[in-house]
Amino acid sequence: MKLKPLAQAAALTALAISAQIGFAEDWSDTSLAYTYGTAFKEPFVSNGADIKKDIYSLKHVGGDKYGTNFFNIDLLESNKVDSDAQEAYVVYRRLLDFGKIAGKDYSTSYANGFGLTAGFDWNTKNDPGYASKKRMLVVGPTAMLKVPGFLNVSLLALNESNQPVGISERYTYKTHADVSSAWDLHLGHGFNFQGFADLIAPKGKNEFGGSTAAEQHFFGAVMYDISQPLGAQANTFKVGAGYEWWRNKFGNAYSAGDPGAFAKTPFARAEYHF
């Protein structure tokens, strides 16, 4: 039972990496990361009690003549508050750069260019209460803003479905909007600020007939490059700390009396880039 999410995630990882080989990437950055926090939350779990989680991540970012690819898989392990659950969460995004495709310069005073983002989210979790099996397709325009580093802002349409325990057929939510941003800002002196944020509209009724709420999610970390003291190339090893703020998690209304739908989580993080 506990190995099933990890086995499925491994299969998806292999497929995604195989797909990347088909692109002649001009640049790429692949990394392994470990994140640890003691104040994660899950909706409807132990009256909002804090959950300790170990998160192991594999991330790949690369650019080619048409745009960029982003792939990330998180393997999350909870403590007993969340039934020692294991979860795999996969994200893939393909950004098609209009300027690169057309061979023209579409930059402005505030943006390096514009494009179209498409991709998917996929998860599976083996907790006894809900056992999420999320599937989500995303598409929408993206602006690549001029900053020291990168900052992409997208307006995405989300088509999400799930089939938790006790639901005989996959349930599809109302297609809804997401103002999404992702960034990695160079702060100088070996520091960078990285993360993502989403403002997600309500997605209609949930699979049990209840109303969903607008969702706000921020995940950011300040990282420091410790490669030089370790005798490695710059940006190989990074350590840092961050904060996650997640209100109405997965569309569950915190105001409706679910304390697990509002997470305020400091965390520590380490990364190895290769």
Image (tube, rainbow, N blue to C red):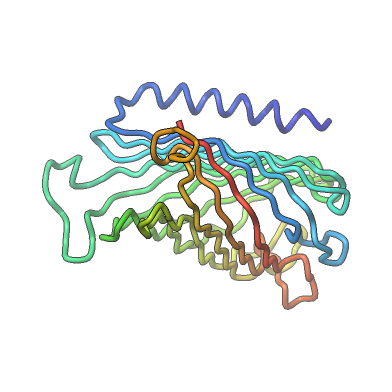
State the quadrant of the C terminus: top left
Q: Going by the image, does 25 lie left or right of 38?
A: left
State the quadrant of the N terminus: top right
Residue 64 percent location from the top left of the image:
28, 33
Residue 196 drawn above or below residue 131: below
Which residue is painted at 51% across and 66% down in the image?
A: 199
Q: Going by the image, does 103 lie left or right of 39?
A: left
Q: Going by the image, does 190 lie left or right of 201?
A: left
Is residue 44 at all visible to an observer of this figure? yes
Is residue 152 at all visible to an observer of this figure? no
Which residue is painted at 59% across and 39% down in the image?
A: 57
Q: Which residue sits furthest left?
A: 104
Which residue is painted at 22% across and 54% down in the image?
A: 113
Residue 54 drawn above or below residue 7: below
Q: Which residue sits furthest bottom?
A: 255
Which residue is painted at 26% across and 45% down in the image?
A: 97
